[in-house]
């Protein structure tokens, strides 16, 4: 059921409104004594989830026994990042999700279901995996906090993705990503109903008897001054709160261009984006508005690796961001990709498919490294001078010599596509 739903698409919800909303939500759970919170990590720093987590701790006090950031395959959060995102929330409450080892399986979605939702293209079963702290930690309330926004794997991020992928194991992460990649990134981006979501919804049904879940979901969008604000807050224990949040996100986080663009420039905040695994949101979220033979320039001063995980970093360096047929052939022929399907999916998602050019200006990767994975190399200092992110807001601009380009200050906040695409 939905416990709370509020939107303010004009001014946004300020701290006082969010605090009042949380008090209203928690009044339905006054008898709970051992609470686990599942927020996102720094890759969702703009979600409002850090502030909400801190407010939950302030309200519940010692009843909050554990906080488990939903890392997926991302690098663990460092103390400085925890302090920036979660304020005064005690560092001692935070646990690390070890996605390769700290996992319990609660059941499996049968191969017949996977085959049905993928039109027979895939026939493996799917494990319902979560961190052991979620399934066996003795909590009587698990609060999953996060942002609903367009996403390359699940169509719209969050809801049960935060639990079964963000806090899932390697097999679940691998298979969910591969299902999305096989369905096609441009078919799945921004959709509410798709094969990956169907699988996660079935996982929710299997896990429900073990997991006392409450979802608190935000929708975040820029105001007229390009400042991100919480425009909607939704809470519930089933899919309806997600559907309400997704509907608002589709209204606020989608930008439709009158036609495909020849030049797009994306800024990646160095505090948030340190790998192409994360930074390739610049490609995912813009690809449907870039013209054939167009160019995407990625300003990425903080990017220093390809994968967040060393094993995946090695695979990206080995195979590169090639076309979908090439990556599928590599996967069929090589056990290292077969055993790391999320890496194979990522390589597909990050490929421009030889349709447009990607110029990657990474602050800590050499020309040889960037070009070896299939991207064009950009000199970060020169491009930062030409397209100064400190003086630009999201929108159309023109350089002193007359070049028109579209600038995006944070690709994680939305989805951009041309009007010709349904």
Image (tube, grey):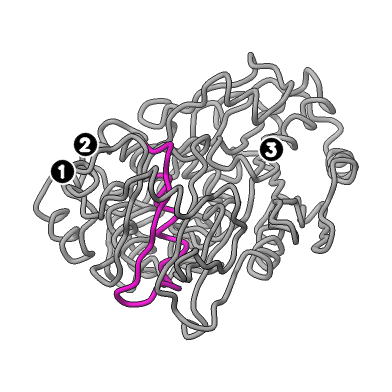
Q: Are marks 2 and 1 in contact (CB under 8 Å)?
A: yes
Residue at numbered disc 2: 314
Count all numbered tags in the image, as a single digit: 3
Contact flag, marks 1 and 3 (Cβ < 8 Å): no
Residue furthest front in the image: 401
Residue nearest the viewer, comparing 148 with 240: 148
Assign a secondary structure to mark 2: helix
Circle 3 crowding by C-alpha within 10 Å: few under 14, some 14–19, many from 20: many
Query: Do residues under tags 3 and 2 come within 8 Å of each other at their CB atoms?
Result: no
* Residue 126 rendering spot, x and y as whole percentages: 37, 51
- Pointer 1: what residue? 318
Q: Which residues are magenta?
A: 277-303
Q: Answer with left or right where residue 52 lies relative to residue 187.
A: right
Residue drawn at x 34%, y 72% is 294
Residue 327 location (% of width, % of height)? 19, 58
Which of the 4 image quarters holds residue 313?
top left
Label 3, secondary structure: give it.
strand
Image mark for residue 143: 3
Query: Measured along the vertical axis of the image, is residue 354 above or below residue 15?
Result: below
**Residue 31 in picture, x, y percent from top left:** 84, 30
SS category of the residue bearing label 1? helix
x, y (%) of residue 316? 23, 44
| Residue that extends furthest to the left in the rendered view of this protein | 333
Mark 1: few, some, or many residues within 10 Å (few <14, many ≥20)?
few
Q: Residues within 10 Å of mark 2 (few under 14, many from 20)?
A: some
User: Marks 1 and 3, Cα distance to the nearest angstrom?
Assistant: 39 Å
Residue in front for this viewpoint, 342 or 79 = 79
As rendered, which of 195 and 152 lies closer to the eye? 152
Q: Which corner quadrant of the image does residue 413 belong to?
A: bottom right
Whether residue 282 appears in magenta in the rendering, the answer is yes
């Amino acid at each position: 059921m939905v416990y709370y739903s509020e939107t303010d698409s004009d001014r946004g919800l300020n701290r006082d409104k969010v605090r009042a909303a949380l008090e209203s939500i928690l009044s339905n759970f006054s008898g709970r004594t051992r609470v686990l919170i599942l927020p996102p990590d720094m890759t969702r720093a703009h979600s409002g989830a850090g502030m909400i987590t801190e407010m939950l701790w302030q309200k519940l006090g010692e009843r909050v026994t554990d906080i488990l950031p939903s890392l997926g395959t991302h690098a663990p959060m460092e103390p400085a990042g925890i302090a920036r995102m979660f304020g005064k929330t005690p560092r001692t409450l935070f646990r690390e999700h070890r996605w390769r080892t700290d996992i319990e399986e609660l059941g499996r979605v049968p191969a017949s279901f996977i085959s049905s939702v993928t039109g027979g293209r895939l026939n493996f079963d799917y494990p319902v995996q979560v961190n052991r702290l979620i399934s066996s930690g003795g909590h009587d309330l698990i609060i999953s906090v996060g942002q609903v926004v367009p996403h390359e794997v699940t169509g719209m991020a969050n809801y049960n993705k935060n639990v079964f992928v963000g806090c899932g194991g390697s097999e679940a992460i691998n298979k969910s990503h591969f299902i999305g990649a096989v369905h096609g990134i441009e078919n799945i981006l921004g959709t509410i109903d798709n094969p990956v979501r169907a699988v996660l919804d079935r996982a929710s049904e299997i896990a429900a008897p073990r997991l006392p879940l409450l979802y608190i979901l935000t929708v975040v969008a820029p105001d007229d001054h390009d400042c991100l604000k919480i425009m909607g807050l939704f809470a519930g224990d089933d899919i309806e709160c997600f559907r309400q949040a997704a509907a608002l996100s589709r209204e606020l986080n989608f930008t439709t261009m009158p036609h495909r663009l020849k030049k797009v420039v994306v800024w990646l905040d160095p505090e948030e984006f340190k790998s192409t695994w994360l930074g390739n949101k610049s490609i995912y979220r813009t690809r449907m508005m870039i013209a054939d033979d167009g160019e995407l320039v990625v300003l990425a001063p903080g990017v220093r690796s390809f994968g967040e995980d060393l094993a995946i970093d090695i695979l990206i360096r080995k195979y590169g961001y090639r076309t979908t047929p090439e990556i599928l052939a590599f996967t069929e022929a090589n056990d290292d990709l077969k055993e790391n399907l999320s890496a194979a999916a990522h390589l597909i998602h990050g490929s421009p498919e030889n349709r447009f050019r990607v110029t990657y200006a990474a602050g800590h990767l050499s020309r040889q490294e960037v070009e070896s994975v299939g991207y064009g190399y950009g000199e970060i200092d020169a491009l930062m001078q030409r397209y100064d992110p400190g003086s630009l807001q999201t929108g159309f601009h023109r350089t002193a010599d007359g070049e028109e380009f579209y600038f995006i200050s944070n690709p994680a906040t939305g989805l951009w596509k041309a009007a010709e695409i349904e």
